[in-house]
Image: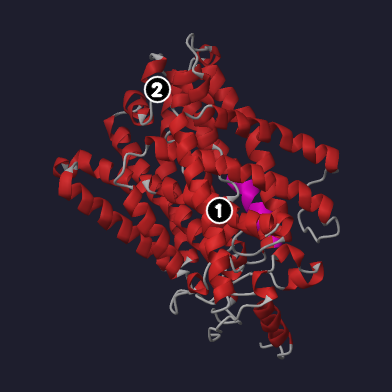
Amino acid sequence: MNPEIQVQPSPISTRSAATMPETLHESCLPKQSTNIKKHQKATNKLGLLPLVFLIYFEVSGGPFGSEQTVQAGGPLLAILGFVLFPFVWSIPEALITAELATALPGNGGFVLWADRAFGSFSGSLMGSWKFLSGAINSAAYPALCADYVARAVPSISSGAPRVATVTATTVLLSFLNYTGLSVVGYTAVALCAASLFPFFVLAATALPKLRLRRWGKIAKDRDWRLFFNTLFWNLNFWDNASTLAGEIDNPQRTFPRALLAAGLLTSVAYLMPLLAGTGALDVAYSEWDSGFYADVAGMITGHWLKYWVEVGAVLSAIGLYEAQLSSSAFQLLGMADLGFLPKFFSLRSKWFSTPWVGILTSSLISLGISFLSLEDIISSANFLYSLGMLLEIASFLWLRRKEPRLKRPFHVPFRMPGLIFMCLVPSGFLIYVMTLASWKVFVISGGLTLFGSAMYFFMELCKSRGFLKFTTQGEKVGEVEEEEGKPNEA
């Protein structure tokens, strides 16, 4: 391990990464934290298969929660939504992620991109928006697991038993995350197989009962806000895995392939039960609320499949929590490597090389939020995520103009007018979703944004006064030069 160095105030300590010369900055990307062994074995890197399923759980985790598209618009609009919406939202977001994650493959992902494009304040604010959004979202998953367990054990549905159950669930799932990305990745593979398989059974048993005319129906009373919010919730977060880019084996090749495979898997996960349920059943659209797929399985196949789907929902929640926690923890590590957070946040486990400080911090925040009323807070998290995505899109376009010669192993095959057109629809949709927010959401989101801005200036003050230890660009240059001067090891 590298010994921590006391950082003295100097011009370079507060210098934005965006001001570094291009060739120098590329050599100093925070691909992994400085306190990890330099010559880490390749077997510790994340491969294609586990990355596919981590991205799948970052984005989807299965069709659970997508039922409300039918309630809001009817079968035809729901089917069209999951067929067409990826082309105007998911694919542009995935393409942006693929280009930037392969061009700048360091831990921190979108934080690194915003910092490179617009400077340190934008990078820090991006980090605040995305981290708060992710921590709030992940808080719902241990609580969801506890709610499902309470169906079998009613005594833990409230009070101290529920608090103990949520806390124990959070601790166990966080410890699993601590054991390493590869373990989490292959656990995600198993969780996906176990949670999706009942829907393959559902689709097979629904075939004799399908009536194609049912797919063409539209709800009389359409709720566009619910419809678009549900689509948006179920088809975003493609960029979250970018915070792990420094841990991926050959990210320039692996990341685009993983995004494509995860996109296909996600489409199948949503469309298969949707087509089966709406084509085989003729029920009131108001019945299609969150959790209704378990009832669909019971009505079409039998109660045994209903229970299996409910167990699948718990397994999916576990996968969602693990993927989100990994993203949040490595984001904090990446921000420490960039000098936005104290060097303490880049500490890794000696046994598993995982960012234990990031895991602990993210878990404690999520645990605290899990006991609160989440309706307005979760809406605020979505609002912050939208702000972050707008900054991410702007970073993508600006880097194309600012650094046209930046090596991009994956290159979106459009010139600037085409890129602007590709980003126009997603940007418009983000703004539309934000206009649907209530005044409480605006107040909470504004307060959290002010908090993120204040944190940036507080960290800058700590740097200038030497209160805390930070990684600086000068320190990175020295480490790179020291490493390049050593002979290659077998």
- In the rendered image, the residue lying farthest to the left is 155
- Numbered circle sitting on residue 412: none
The nearer-to-camera label among 1 and 2 is 1
**Foreground residue among 489 and 278:** 489
**Foreground residue among 471 and 406:** 471
Check disc 2: other Cα within 10 Å, few if <14, some if 14-19, many if 20+. many
Q: Residue at x 69, y 74 (%)?
A: 11
Amino acid carrying label 2: it is: Trp
109 magenta-colored: no
Whether residue 119 is visible to the viewer of this picture, yes or no, is yes
256 magenta-colored: yes
Residue at mark 2: 288
Q: Is residue 363 left or right of residue 235?
A: left
Residue 30's x, y, as percent? 64, 69
Residue at mark 1: 453
Residue 208's x, y, as percent? 45, 21
**Span highlighted in magenta in the image:** 252-262
- Write down the quadrant of residue 417 in the picture: top right
**Foreground residue among 110 and 410:** 110
Residue 234's x, y, as percent? 51, 36
- In the rendered image, the residue lying farthest to the top is 220
